[in-house]
Amino acid sequence: MIAHVSGVVAEKFGQSVIVDVHGLGYEVHVATLDYDSALLGEEVKFYTYHHIREQSQELFGFTSLMAKKLFELLIGVQGVGPKAALAILSLADSETVRNAIALSDSTYLSKASGVGKKTAERVVVDLSDKVGVVTALIQQTPVSSASVSDEATEALMALGFNLADAMAALEKVPSDLSTADRVTQALRGRN
């Protein structure tokens, strides 16, 4: 399993980025926002999902761990393959897509290339309770020590927390600590 790829953007084509890792090029399929932000010759890090089929192997990459986890939830839905999941994540940033699922907005999801109305409705039915509540409903005030794009929040979500629980666990943890220390303190505070 290839968990992440870090290196220099060597080439871009279609919806793929070739990342040069010490002379070895990895082709990584990415969502539109990640594709647009990957600049030739610049350092990048993609969290990857290694998709293995009988006749091929593909890497799907994401600049945030939360996007990767949402991708994994999406491909768990019957009828949603990796390409359709990537198309859904190409609609907007991962938080906007997550909110659309939480709000049961199948019309928005059906705008993704190759995703029909029935598939979008299945995504909403299967995942609306798994993605957590809408971000705007979690906090009516600005988030101080934990934010949606925070690495500590993403790490807790990788450990199985939903977004609301991850943000609540980090609420009283000082934001000036390292990511590892913040996650450790959040986990200790939960017990």
Image: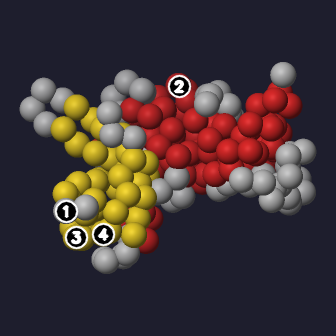
Can you identify the residue that label 1 sits on?
Answer: 23
Residue contact at pointers 1 and 3, CB within 8 angstroms: no
Q: Amino acid at mark 2?
A: Asp
Q: Are marks 4 and 2 in contact (CB under 8 Å)?
A: no
Q: Nearer the viewer, mark 4 or mark 1?
A: 1
Name the residue beneath numbered marker 2.
Answer: 126
| Amino acid type for the residue under numbered disc 3 | Glu
State how far apart marks 1 and 3 are (Cα): 13 Å
Q: Is residue 100 left or right of residue 12?
A: right
Q: Residue at x 68, y 50 (%)?
A: 179
Image-quadrant location for residue 169: top right
Question: Residue 56 in the image: x percent, y percent?
Answer: 13, 36
Q: CA distance from mark 2 to mark 1?
A: 42 Å
Three-letter amino acid code of the residue under disc 4 = Val
In this picture the colour scheme is secondary structure
Residue carrying label 3: 11
Any part of residue 105 in sight: no
Q: Is residue 28 visible?
A: yes
Give the CA distance from mark 4 to mark 1.
12 Å
State how far apart marks 2 and 3 are (Cα): 36 Å
Label 3 Cα neighbours within 10 Å, binned few <14 / some 14-19 / many ≥20 = some
Label whose residue precedes the other's in the sequence (2 or 3):
3
Who comes first in sequence, dot 4 or dot 2? Answer: 4
Q: Is residue 75 left or right of residue 129?
A: left
Marks 4 and 1, the one that precedes in the sequence: 4
Where disc 4 sits, the SS reads strand
Q: Residues within 10 Å of mark 1 (few under 14, many from 20)?
A: few
**Residue named by callout 4:** 9
Say whether marks 3 and 4 touch (CB < 8 Å): yes
Measuring 85% from the left and 58% from the top, which residue is drawn there?
144
